[in-house]
Amino acid sequence: MGDRWHIEVDRSVCIGSGMCVSTAPGAFALDSARQSRPAAPERDADERVLEAAEGCPVEAITLTLADSGEAVFPPEE
């Protein structure tokens, strides 16, 4: 069985660019305030979700392993 990720969007940082929605359709949505939110707080690991997190212009998206809390993105240094 593959990894499951916990997805968070820091709404105090999100600028509503919509890049996450276009990169990973179905994984993110923009609300009426044009801020991103995950469609579900947990989901199976998905390359498109990782690309969306990496491509966020303000780094508002955090991905962690659902079972351990270990950082997926941004990576711990």
Image (cartoon, grey):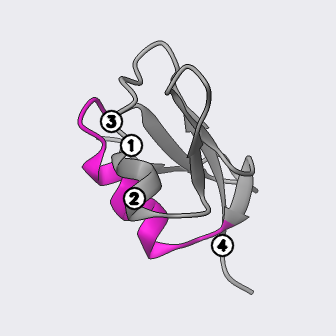
Give the quarter of the figure containing the C terminus: top left
Q: Residue at x 41, y 24 (%)?
A: 14
Q: Secondary structure at mark 3?
A: loop
Q: Residue at x 40, y 29 (%)?
A: 16
Residue 8 occupies quadrant: top right
Q: Earlier in the sequence, mark 4 or mark 3?
A: 4
Q: Label 1 neighbourhood size at 10 Å, few (<14), some (14-19), many (20+)?
A: some
Q: CA distance from mark 4 to mark 3?
A: 28 Å
Q: CA distance from mark 1 to mark 4?
A: 26 Å
Q: Which of labels 1 and 4 is toward the front?
A: 1
Q: CA distance from mark 2 to mark 1?
A: 6 Å
Q: Label 3 neighbourhood size at 10 Å, few (<14), some (14-19), many (20+)?
A: some
Amino acid marked by disc 4 = Asp
Do the residues under discs 1 and 3 have CB atoms within 8 angstroms? yes
The numbered disc on residue 22 is: 2
Q: Is residue 10 left or right of residue 40?
A: left
Do the residues under discs 2 and 4 have CB atoms within 8 angstroms? no
Q: Residue at x 37, y 42 (%)?
A: 76
Q: Is residue 55 magenta?
A: yes
Residue placed farthest to the front in the image?
32
Q: Label 2 neighbourhood size at 10 Å, few (<14), some (14-19), many (20+)?
A: some
Q: Is residue 57 left or right of residue 44?
A: left
Do the residues under discs 2 and 1 have CB atoms within 8 angstroms? yes
Instruction: Identify the residue position indicated by label 3 in the image.
Output: 17
Q: Secondary structure at mark 2?
A: helix
Amino acid marked by disc 1 = Gly
Region rendered in magenta: 44-59
